[in-house]
Amino acid sequence: MIESTAKNVVLSVQEYTLYTWRAVLCLFSKPVYWTDTLVQADTIGAGSALIVALTGFFLGAVLALESDSLLAAFGATGYMGRFVGMTMLVELGPVLTGIIVAGRNASTMASELGSMVVTEQVDAMSSLGVDPVRKLVTPRLVATVVTLPLLTLLADAFGLLGGGWIAVVRLHIPVHKYISDAYATAGWPDVMQGLVKPVVFAFILASDGCFYGMRTSGGAEGVSRSTIQAVVTSSLLILMADFMISHIMIQLFP
């Protein structure tokens, strides 16, 4: 039982790696379906903007609210902007944006592609000489990698806005003090970490959603199963990647 499970895991990882590599290589040869890429970017980016902005705003407000008593115990309430800015930029902004987009878009990719597989649309596409990976997977991969960093910046901005709302209205911290502290927090290593993470997370969730979608079998039940697997796996991989990137960045920029 253990041997069979381990073998299936290794084969799945191998299949995923080869599949993803094939999707990346499609970028360097023609045809490249830029129109499909723009459509997917609009679906992923514009479609997720509102939920990401609201999540960032209330997350920043909660951070400011919960950290008030902790910072007050050390007489550091004036550093509210620094605390909210660092937390949103380096950690919570990229991670929560990645998980939100994984729940919204990785599931969509898996269900869309899974439905096309079980209804034999992908087979029909192949029979017409169209590469399904080039047509269906690569545009989604590129669109996600481009839009997720922008969504993360949106979440960071609204997180700082939410934290500023609490800091100014409830804690009576001057606006210029909050803004200057938040700005002083953003060193280049922190900015780099806050932008590298969403690129990696985007690649993970898009490739994972497409992978499970394209290997769907078993009709409607299989589509449901692939959707759940895509969301769960991509969320776990995002958290694992977050740990590894943070560890590497701390070693490079102690």
Image (cartoon, rainbow, N blue to C red):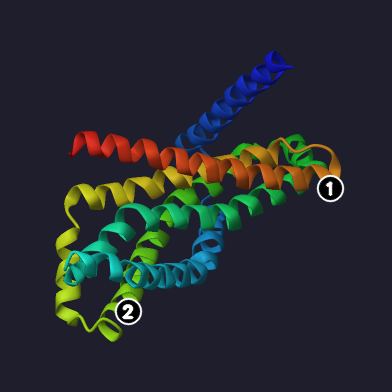
Question: From the image, which quarter does the N terminus lie in?
Answer: top right
Distance (Cα) linking label 1 and label 2: 47 Å
The residue at the point 59 percent across, 55 percent down is 103
The residue at the point 32 percent across, 80 percent down is 165
> Relative to 223, is 184 on the left or the right?
left
Where does label 1 land, which residue?
A: 220
Please tell me the numbered disc located at residue 62. Answer: none
> Relative to 60, is 119 on the left or the right?
right
Tags 1 and 2 touching, CB below 8 Å: no
> Relative to 16, is 180 on the left or the right?
left
Compare residues 204 and 71 and report the one nearer the observer. Answer: 71
Quadrant of res 23: top right
The residue at the point 48 percent across, 68 percent down is 49
Q: Is residue 13 above or below residue 215?
A: above
Q: Is residue 217 visible?
A: yes
Q: Is residue 42 above or below residue 203?
A: below
Amino acid type, label 1: Ala
Where's residue 51, x and y in %? Answer: 51, 69
Q: Is residue 223 above or below residue 105?
A: above
Disc count in the image?
Answer: 2
Quick one: which residue is furthest to the top in this view? 3
Where does label 2 land, which residue?
A: 166
Compare residues 179 and 116 and report the one nearer the observer. Answer: 179
Query: Which tag, 1 or 2, sits closer to the chain's start?
Result: 2
Q: Is residue 42 above or below residue 235?
A: below
Question: From the image, which quarter does the C terminus lie in?
Answer: top left
Q: Secondary structure at mark 1?
A: helix
Q: Secondary structure at mark 2?
A: helix
Q: Is residue 149 visible?
A: no
Q: Residues within 10 Å of mark 1 (few under 14, many from 20)?
A: some
The residue at the point 55 percent across, 52 percent down is 102
Amino acid type, label 2: Ile
